Amino acid sequence: MSARKGFPGLSGGGWGIVCDFDGTITPFDVTDAVLDAFADKQWEEIEREWTGGGITARECMERQIGLLRVSPRELDAFLDRVPLTAGFAEFVAVCRSRKLDLSIVSDGMDYAITRVLARHGLEGVPVLANRLVFRGGSRYALEFPHGAEGCPSGMCKCGLTRGTGRRILLIGDGSSDCCLAGEAAFVLAKRHRKLERHCLENNYPCRPYDDFFDILRFLCGSGRLP
């Protein structure tokens, strides 16, 4: 995909691209994969408690991360094997060449995101996420520098983007993206995932995608955003 084509639908400025991480930039949820590999199986019970509406997403993640038992070296080795969704590196290159405002905004773990990106040579992409804190030995905690009162998520994506005066192009897949979808000017939603269903049910401007090559074909081809 030639970077020189640009994004016709984003011409004229005023756009901010907000991209989710888990299940979007990566083909699976990295946080869940880390928990599955290194946490007591109680993390799955906590997950069910969240999906059943008994606790918030923030409470869920805080308790789950407290169950992790893994050395930093083992964690790094695990994260260094995480693949990217096809086309993401090329997508970043096009955004950089066109000076488009791309940020990764995730309800996942900041350390995992920056480690995976660095492993693939993508340092420098702005990342906003929950803060993973090493407590010594093999224990961890999670802090929420981007949370907001009344928001059930650790990362309040709406709060970070509201009032910026920019039109938001949201790229995502799941529950943590659904609130922002209602305020975004346009949504690119992973096909057959919760975000796509949410957009269709609420008549939000949306287009499904399979990978970032699909996104590039749309935005660099005939894609015209509102």
Image (cartoon, rainbow, N blue to C red):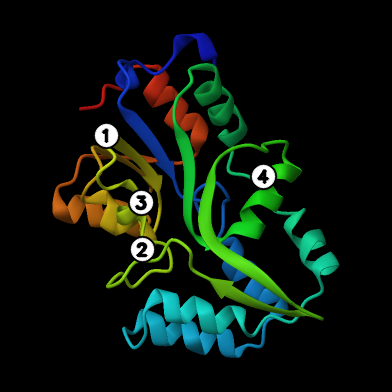
Question: Vertically, is 44 above or below 11?
Answer: below
Mark whose residue sits in front, 2 or 1: 1
Q: Which amino acid type is shown beneath numbered disc 4?
A: Leu
Element at label 2 = helix
Write down the quadrant of residue 56 in the picture: bottom left
**Where is 4 relative to 90, above or below?**
above
Question: Where is residue 87 drawn, in percent x and y?
Answer: 57, 33
Residue drawn 58% across the image and 64% down it: 131
Q: Position of residue 192 (x, y in %)?
A: 37, 53
**CA–CA distance in space, label 3 to label 4:** 22 Å
Residues tagged 2 and 4 counted as in contact (Cβ below 8 A):
no
Amino acid type indicated by mark 1: Arg
Q: Which residue is mark 3?
A: 160
Q: Is residue 181 left or right of residue 212?
A: left
Mark 2 Cα shell of 10 Å, populated few (<14), some (14-19), many (≥20): some
Q: Which residue, given by chain and number where applicable, does mark 1 sit on?
A: 167
SS at badge 4: helix
Rendered residue at 26%/21% (across/down): 224
Q: Nearer the viewer, residue 89 or 145?
A: 145
Asked whether 63 or 91 is in front, the reply is: 63
Whether residue 87 is visible here, answered yes or no, is yes
The image quadrant where one finds the N terminus is top right
Q: Few, some or many C-alpha atoms within 10 Å of disc 4 (few <14, some 14-19, many ≥20)?
A: many
Mark 2: amino acid:
Ser
Check if mark 3's residue and mark 4's residue have beta carbons within 8 Å.
no
The residue that label 4 is drawn on is 117
Q: Residues within 10 Å of mark 1 (few under 14, many from 20)?
A: some
Is tag 1's residue or tag 3's residue first in the polypeptide sequence? 3
